[in-house]
Each structure stands twice: as structure tokens, then as C-alpha cells.
């Protein structure tokens, strides 16, 4: 904003008044030239008062104080001899009244949106200080929303008309360097910056975090440059330091039912530098598994995600449950292969994924059966070929540092007898997940400025699932199954199975430290041949989440209908 000129008193010896050795007393203090701004308001900042000694320094200080009120373009002081003393008159020239405020260069916000930050109004006397605060609020609005490079570049005042120029620097180029294996487009698609975008630091930090989370780089550094002194454009320079993405892992584990197991895994999370994932491995034990997968998980409106893989599993001495009661032990062998492809729609909140799967299952060696046991398992040997379609609507806030929003998906699984399949059925189910910060509901009742911050709030999370099928009785491997650490936590794995199911999981996640969260939860649901809403199973309990370099360590203690269970793992249940 152009600085309005302050014209101080050029002559402090007027009408025979002089500032000499002899001190003169002020008899009166007045203001002239003001029509809109009250005399009392002006004199409120003046230290020169009747009865005080006339002082050059005090007069100069008063002139500056009046000028700093912001309403005046000219301030001076005149003096008259009066009754043996001096009458002081401050002469002012008021700024013009505001006729209009015009913004140019603003594309992110409309003039109407910017005017909501402006307290200066048309028809009032222009005040420099107030308007400077208005401009600060406008800039703060941009910065608060992540546009930290935006600034007010110029202000022109022509009479009562004010012209404000907003500079919104645009990205000219994104320069990526340091990558020798990773293809440049793999980095670019995560950063999501292109020429002409207005730089947003909030979105950029999020995308930078996702890039670092890929695990391809030891370090990522960012620099900015203004090309050729043009402050309306900015170059973003990304320097990466790559690391090895291939690794060999040793797997050791223990399960209540599966016992001790161990194996090896070889994986590469950045195959060919194209962001493809490859993994091959095995686990040996009571439950032995051999698998390989090859996938390209990234998808957008122009890029297909895909995955292919195969898995062989041999499970010796497995327990079979019916309606929550163990029936017998058995051995199981399954071999499956799959291939899938998917993409986002033009509205990238929506996506689809189609999977073709073939699974061959064998059940044998039934033993340790209870009296009067029920066997609806071993008759279902055979080959199952399915076509699975998932449609997803993801409205989570990708820029929030915690899960926020909701996700809804619909799933269809059609078993076909084409090319050797033994079964023909249609399964259909849907799932909704909701994540809501509780901070806004706690304001005034609890201190939410400490542990429960906007970045780490108290969170309510819920998952609702329901599904059915066209057959009253499904093959064992195709049935809906509940029980275990990822569904009904107070029960054994696969305690309840059937062609219909419903499930509700509810959690209140309460941070107690920056890396520690206590979780209270309640689970309810059932799986059976019929959809009997009155016949349900539930559990409740407490959990602990601890952030580690390997992800969230998860411990859950659940109280079911007949016994309590404790689970250990990584990551959230949903």
C-alpha cells in the first residue's frame, strides 16, 4: 500500500510563539479540519493538555500519534498567544470516504469471499491502520488454507477507490532429480503438481508424506526457485535419494490354533522402478502357505491398477465350528489363482475393481468329533470359479492427518461353472465405514487443546457390514465368516458361518499421549443360513494402540459370551 505522507509542523514558531529557554504554558487544545472524525477521539491520543508546559517533543509526538490513528493524510500544529499562555490547534486533513474496494488477481476466492475478511466499509473514512489489518486477514486466510506463497502485491488508492492486487504464484515446473531407478512419472503421480497449479503447502506436505511412505527413498528434499525473477511463478525442485526396495524377510509366528510357524519372503516394492509390487514366500508349520503376487496398486482416472497371484495352503488339524461350537478337527488343502484390474472414475471419489479367481479346495481326515457332530464341510470339495466386482465411494479427507469422513463399498461375487467350476451362486454384500472427530462435541466440557488436538483428536469409528446370497447353503470356503480379531473379537476365528451375515464394530479411540491411544470397543453380529436379527452375538472390551516405526501396535482384550480373548497385531481393524 502506498504510504500516505505525514507533513509535520514545519514551523514551530508561529504568531510570536517560540520554544526558547522560557517555558510557556498551554491554555487550550483544539482541532480543526475534521468533519467526520470526532474531536474527542482525536484528542484522546494527545498528551498536550491545558496547564501543561508547551514542549516541542510533545507536540511532535502528538502529531505522530494523531497521524497513526490512520484517518488523516495531513497533520500539523498551530499556536496562538492566549491569556498569557499558548493555544494549540491541531490541523488535520481527513482521508476520503471509501467508495469502492476492487480486487484483481484473485482466482482461488471470489471478491465476495475476500470482502468477508474486510472490516472497512464503503461510506466510511478510509483508515490506513484498519485497512492494513484487513489485508493481513486476507493473507492469513490464504495461508491458513495452505496457500503460503500468496500475498498482497500492491494497493492503489485513487480518491475513494481502492484497488488491491493479489499475487497467487503458480507452479511453472516440477523438477525431479536424484532418481536413477524410479521412473520420474512414478514420483510425479504421487506429488500431483503440474504447471499452472497454485502451490498449496498443506496438500504438498500430504503428497510428500505419501511419496516418502512408498519406501523407495532414504530422503526427499524440497527447494523452490523463482524463474528469472518472475515472482508470479515458482519452480518446485524435488531431490530424492533412493534406497534398496528388494528385501528378504524371515517370518516367525505363533497362533492359538496354528501353533508355531516360520518361513521366508522375498519382496520388491518398486519392481523395475515402476512402483510395481512383487512378493514370493512360504510359511511352514501346522498351517503351511506358499504364495506369489505381482501387482501395480496405483490407480487414478487414467491409470489402471492390477494384480495377479497364486496361493497354496495346507492346514493340518484345523478346528471346524458350527454356530460357535467346535465340531471336529480336519485337514484342508486349497490352491487359488487370481487376476484383477481396476481404475477410478472421472470423479475420483469413485473406483471399481474386477477380480477373476479360481480356487480348488480339499477337506479330509475328520477326527476328534464331538458326539452328534454336524458335518456340512467335507461335502464341499471342488473347484470354485468366481467373478468379483467392487464399487467404492471414498469420501475420506485425504489431507487430514487422521481417518476422517466415510467409505462405502458394494461387492458382488458370482460363482460360474464356465471352464470347470463346480458351483453357481451369487453373493452380495455392502460395507460402510465412518470416522468422526469428537473434539467439536467436547468443547466447553474438556480440554481439547492438549492431547486431543486437531491433528490427533478423540475419534469415533464405526463399521457396518451386511451381506446375503442367492443360495441358502454355500460351500464352506465361500460362506460369510465371523469371529476373531478382525470381526467379533470375543470369539474364535470362524465361530459363526452362513450364507447371510451382519456385523457392527464401534470404537472410541482416545489419545492419551502423542504415540499412545486407548480404545473402547463394542462388536455385534452373526452369520447363519437365515437372517435372524434377534439372534446375535456381541462382545466388548478395551484396546491399546502404540505408534511404532512398523505401524500401529495393536492389543485388544475382548469379553465374549462365554470367554475372554486377547489379540496382538499391527494396524487398525478398520
Image: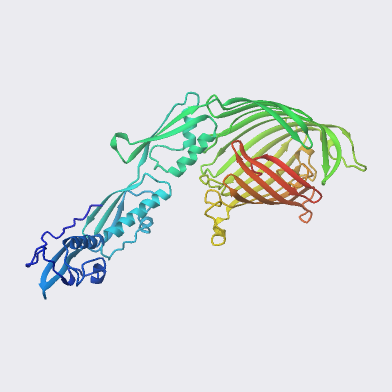
Quadrant of the rendered image containing residue 24: bottom left
Residue 445 at what x, y percent from top left? 57, 61
Q: Is residue 409 above or below residue 245?
A: below
Say which of 353 and 219 sits in front.
219
Quadrant of the rendered image containing residue 387: top right
Q: Is residue 289 visible?
A: no
Residue located 31% across and 63% down the image: 121
Say which of 520 and 234 sits in front.
520
Say which of 240 and 381 sits in front.
240
Q: Is residue 65 above or below residue 222?
A: below
Residue 254 at what x, y percent from top left? 75, 34
Quadrant of the rendered image containing residue 37: bottom left
Residue 101 at what x, y percent from top left? 29, 58
Q: Is residue 194 visible?
A: yes
Q: Is residue 419 above or below residue 169?
A: above
Q: Residue furthest right?
A: 371
Residue 142 at what x, y percent from top left? 39, 50
Q: Is residue 397 left or right of residue 518?
A: left
Q: Residue furthest left?
A: 16
Q: Quadrant of the C terminus?
A: top right
Total residue callouts: 0
Q: Is residue 92 left or right of residue 509?
A: left
Amino acid at each position: 500500500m502506498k504510504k500516505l505522507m505525514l507533513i509535520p509542523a514545519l514551523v514551530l514558531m508561529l504568531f510570536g510563539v517560540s520554544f526558547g529557554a522560557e517555558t510557556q504554558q498551554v491554555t487550550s487544545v483544539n482541532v480543526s479540519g475534521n468533519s467526520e472524525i470526532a474531536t474527542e477521539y482525536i484528542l484522546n491520543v494527545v498528551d498536550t493538555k491545558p496547564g501543561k508546559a508547551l514542549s516541542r517533543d510533545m507536540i511532535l509526538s502528538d502529531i505522530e500519534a494523531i497521524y497513526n490513528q490512520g484517518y488523516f493524510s495531513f497533520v500539523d500544529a498551530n499556536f496562538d498567544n492566549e491569556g498569557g499562555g499558548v493555544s494549540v490547534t491541531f490541523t488535520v486533513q481527513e482521508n476520503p470516504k471509501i467508495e469502492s474496494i476492487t480486487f484483481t488477481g484473485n482466482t482461488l476466492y471470489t471478491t465476495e469471499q475476500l470482502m468477508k475478511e474486510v472490516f472497512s466499509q464503503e461510506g466510511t473514512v478510509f483508515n490506513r491502520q484498519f485497512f492494513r489489518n484487513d489485508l493481513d486477514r486476507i493473507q492469513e486466510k490464504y495461508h491458513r488454507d495452505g496457500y503460503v506463497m500468496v500475498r498482497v502485491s500492491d494497493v492503489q488508492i485513487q480518491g475513494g477507490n481502492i484497488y488491491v492486487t493479489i499475487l497467487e504464484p503458480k507452479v511453472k515446473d516440477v523438477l525431479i532429480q536424484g532418481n536413477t531407478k524410479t521412473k520420474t512419472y512414478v514420483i510425479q503421480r504421487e506429488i500431483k503438481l503440474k504447471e499452472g497449479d497454485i502451490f498449496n503447502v498443506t496438500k504438498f506436505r500430504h503428497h510428500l508424506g505419501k511419496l516418502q511412505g512408498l519406501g523407495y527413498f532414504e530422503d526427499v528434499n524440497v527447494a523452490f526457485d523463482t524463474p528469472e525473477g518472475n515472482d508470479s511463478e515458482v519452480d518446485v525442485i524435488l531431490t530424492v535419494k533412493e534406497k534398496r526396495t528388494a528385501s528378504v524377510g524371515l517370518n516367525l509366528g505363533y497362533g492359538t490354533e496354528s501353533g508355531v510357524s516360520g518361513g521366508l519372503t522375498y519382496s520388491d516394492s518398486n519392481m523395475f522402478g515402476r512402483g510395481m509390487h512383487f512378493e514370493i514366500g512360504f510359511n511352514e508349520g501346522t498351517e503351511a502357505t506358499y504364495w506369489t503376487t505381482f501387482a501395480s496398486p496405483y490407480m487414478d482416472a487414467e491409470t489402471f491398477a492390477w494384480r495377479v497371484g497364486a496361493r497354496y495352503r495346507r492346514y493340518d488339524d484345523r478346528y471346524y465350528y458350527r454356530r460357535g461350537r467346535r465340531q471336529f478337527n480336519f485337514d484342508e488343502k486349497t490352491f487359488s489363482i487370481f487376476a484383477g484390474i481396476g481404475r477410478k472414475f472421472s470423479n475420483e471419489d469413485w473406483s471399481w475393481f474386477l477380480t477373476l479367481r479360481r480356487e480348488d479346495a480339499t477337506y479330509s481326515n475328520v477326527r476328534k468329533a464331538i458326539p452328534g457332530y454336524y458335518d456340512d464341510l467335507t461335502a464341499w470339495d471342488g473347484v470354485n470359479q468366481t467373478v468379483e466386482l467392487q464399487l467404492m465411494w471414498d469420501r475420506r479427507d485425504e489431507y487430514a492427518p487422521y481417518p476422517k469422513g466415510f467409505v462405502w463399498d458394494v461387492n458382488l461375487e458370482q460363482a460360474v461353472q464356465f471352464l470347470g467350476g463346480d458351483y453357481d451362486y451369487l453373493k452380495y454384500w455392502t460395507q460402510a465405514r465412518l470416522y468422526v472427530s469428537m473434539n467439536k462435541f467436547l468443547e466447553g466440557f474438556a480440554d481439547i487443546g492438549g492431547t486431543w488436538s486437531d491433528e490427533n483428536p478423540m475419534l469415533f469409528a464405526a463399521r457396518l457390514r451386511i451381506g446375503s446370497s442367492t443360495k441358502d447353503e454355500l460351500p464352506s470356503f465361500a460362506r460369510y465368516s465371523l469371529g476373531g480379531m478382525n470381526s467379533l473379537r470375543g470369539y474364535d476365528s470362524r465361530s459363526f458361518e452362513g450364507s447371510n451375515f451382519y456385523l457392527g464394530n464401534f470404537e472410541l479411540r482416545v489419545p492419551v499421549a502423542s504415540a499412545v491411544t486407548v480404545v473402547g470397543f463394542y462388536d455385534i453380529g452373526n452369520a447363519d443360513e437365515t437372517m435372524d436379527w434377534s439372534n446375535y452375538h456381541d462382545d466388548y472390551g478395551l484396546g491399546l494402540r502404540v505408534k511404532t516405526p512398523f505401524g500401529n501396535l495393536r492389543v485388544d482384550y475382548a469379553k465374549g459370551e462365554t470367554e475372554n480373548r486377547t489379540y496382538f497385531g499391527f494396524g487398525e481393524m478398520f
